[in-house]
Image: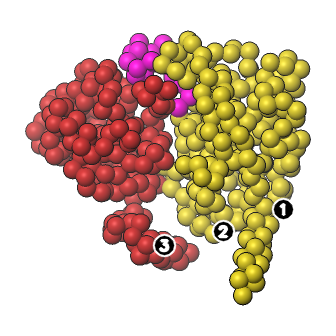
Chain colours: A yellow, B red
């Protein structure tokens, strides 16, 4: 009796995961030095401790997001309120429920707001990664956990940013990094949970602002490693966004704590 | 289409209520709100008296909405003071119609007791709601209010100081980052609402 029951459960959970095709990989975490200073002194870098977490190995695809929208009509284009998703939310889809044939099913979904991305992740028991988690995962290449000091690797990433945004999106599942995570660079921009926590000194919104009190405490922060152009472009983009904004090159992936972690 | 969605929402709310996740909050007015209303965000808060409230329960009057944390020494006291100054400068009829919503960045340290203490020390009467929410909800509220914040490793918060003016349906009709004096943009927005 008991073994049979166990078999049924195993089969059911297998079926669930194949259908969702959401594959997460574990990242060990550890001490990590961000390009954004994390301590109270904005000019001094201090390593932070990244807790172990799991990250989707690839960005959420058009097909996956379409399944989510079908199950959650409140996230359909035209029904999601403007405060949660702007007017161009999923604008390229043929209908509110169907991406249509012009849109490949296995490319990253874009034109999604932070709220919509967050709702998708919550639905699969996950959340958006924090900026630090994303930056930590994206510091690795295929063989090294931290490839950031390698000029050739940086150049390779920058080459992607130099490509016109009008190029069609690639299918997910590019070359994986050492953790088994792919498409962190070279695919799309990605939402992070704390997108609205990334201030930069000299940000356009504060430039020429005589009111230095606009930012509390340590004030606007500096960037430690000014050679990390690719990462800085991410921060610049993310910090310019509002949570309802969508763009044709902005997608997301989800993260979740490891078993036994809070 | 709309009917079936409404039905689904109702079913969802009922099943959640059955699970006692949502303690019997009436959400009937939600669909009547405009798409730009921040009250379209489903967010549960707890006020300085320990009462649970939905963000959308603030609808019906003009609201000044901002965020703070109690242990903040510099800018947050100025946000409170600026709102007090703004309220004092309004004609009595307009002043009494306005409510203030202050949501904490720091739900861990800003317990109900701390919120209560802050309300008392900052002279906040029943016109003010000082509130806390879980961390995810706090970030969503900051997102709809256009407020940036980050927790520093020493437990302090970096945050932008913005005071939003919400109309009775929850649309942001004005905002200011000006502290230490009343911003005419805010008083004009409140005056305009009282005329309409």
Question: Secondary structure under badge 2?
Answer: helix
Q: Which mark is residue A70?
A: 2
Q: Which chain carries label 1?
A: A
Residue B8 shows in the view: yes
Q: Residue B21 carries which label?
A: none
- Residue lying furthest front: A2
Q: Which mark is residue A101?
A: 1
Residue drawn at x 53%, y 34% as measured from the top left: A196
Q: Where is residue B47 in the image (x, y as percent from the top left)?
A: 27, 49
Residue A94 shows in the view: no
Q: Is residue A212 magenta?
A: yes
* Sooner in the amino-acid sequence: mark 1 or mark 2: 2
B26 horizontally vs A45: left or right:
left
Q: Where is residue A237 in the image (x, y as percent from the top left)?
A: 65, 30
Q: Which chain carries label 3?
A: B
Q: Where is residue B142 in the image (x, y as percent from the top left)?
A: 44, 40
Q: Is the magenta stretch mostly helix, strand or loop?
A: loop
A47 horizontally vs B121: left or right:
right
Query: Which residues, given as a range, are shown in magenta?
Result: A197-219
Relative to A84, is A233 above or below? above
User: Could you tell me how far apart the alpha carbons at marks 3 and 2 are, in whole angstroms?
Assistant: 16 Å
Residue drawn at x 56%, y 28% as measured from the top left: A198
Q: Which residue is labeled 3 in the image?
A: B12
Q: Nearer the viewer, mark 1 or mark 2?
A: 2
Q: Does the magenta stretch include residue B181?
A: no
Q: Do labels 1 and 3 share a chain?
A: no
Q: Nearer the viewer, mark 1 or mark 3?
A: 3
Relative to B26, is A172 above or below? above
Q: Which chain carries label 2?
A: A
Residue drawn at x 83%, y 55% as measured from the top left: A106
User: Could you tell me how far apart the alpha carbons at marks 1 and 2 are, in whole angstroms?
Assistant: 17 Å
Question: Secondary structure under badge 1?
Answer: loop
């Amino acid at each position: 009796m008991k073994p049979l029951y166990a078999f049924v459960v195993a089969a059911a959970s297998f079926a669930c995961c194949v259908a969702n095709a959401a594959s997460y990989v574990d990242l060990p975490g550890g001490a990590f030095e961000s390009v954004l200073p994390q301590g109270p002194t904005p000019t001094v870098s201090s390593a932070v401790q990244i807790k172990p977490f799991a990250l989707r190995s690839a960005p959420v695809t058009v097909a996956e997001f379409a399944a989510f929208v079908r199950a959650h009509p409140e996230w359909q284009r035209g029904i999601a309120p403007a405060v949660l998703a702007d007017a161009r939310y999923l604008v390229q889809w043929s209908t509110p429920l169907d991406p249509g044939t012009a849109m490949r099913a296995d490319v990253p979904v874009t034109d999604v707001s932070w709220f919509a991305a967050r709702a998708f992740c919550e639905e699969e028991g996950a959340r958006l990664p924090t900026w630090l988690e994303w930056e930590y995962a994206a510091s690795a290449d295929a063989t090294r956990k931290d490839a950031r000091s390698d000029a050739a690797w940086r150049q390779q990433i920058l080459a992607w940013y130099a490509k016109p945004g009008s190029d069609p999106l690639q299918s997910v599942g590019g070359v994986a990094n050492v953790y088994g995570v792919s498409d962190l660079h070279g695919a799309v921009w990605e939402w992070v949970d704390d997108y609205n926590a990334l201030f930069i000194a000299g940000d356009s919104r504060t430039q020429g602002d005589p009111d230095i009190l606009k930012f509390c405490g340590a004030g606007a922060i500096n960037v430690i490693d000014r050679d990390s152009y690719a990462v800085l472009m991410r921060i610049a983009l993310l910090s310019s966004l509002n949570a309802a904004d969508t763009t044709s090159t902005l997608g997301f992936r989800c993260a979740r704590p490891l078993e036994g972690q809070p | 289409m709309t009917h079936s969605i409404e039905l689904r929402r109702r079913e969802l709310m009922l099943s959640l209520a059955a699970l006692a996740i949502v303690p019997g909050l009436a959400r009937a007015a939600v669909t009547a709100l405009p798409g730009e209303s921040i009250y379209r965000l489903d967010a549960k808060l707890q006020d300085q008296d320990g009462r649970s409230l939905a963000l959308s329960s603030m609808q019906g009057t003009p609201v000044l909405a901002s965020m703070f944390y109690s242990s903040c020494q510099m800018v947050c006291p100025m946000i409170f003071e600026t709102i007090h100054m703004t309220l004092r400068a309004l004609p009595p009829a307009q002043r009494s119609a306005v409510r203030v919503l202050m949501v904490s960045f720091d739900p861990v340290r800003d317990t109900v007791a701390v919120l209560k203490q802050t309300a008392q020390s900052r002279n906040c009467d029943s016109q003010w709601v000082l509130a806390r929410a879980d961390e995810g909800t706090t970030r969503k509220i900051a997102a709809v209010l256009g407020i940036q914040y980050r927790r520093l490793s020493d437990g302090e918060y970096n945050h932008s100081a913005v005071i939003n003016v919400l109309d009775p349906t929850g649309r942001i009709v004005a905002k200011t980052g000006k502290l230490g004096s009343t911003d005419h943009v805010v008083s004009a927005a409140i005056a305009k609402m009282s005329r309409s």
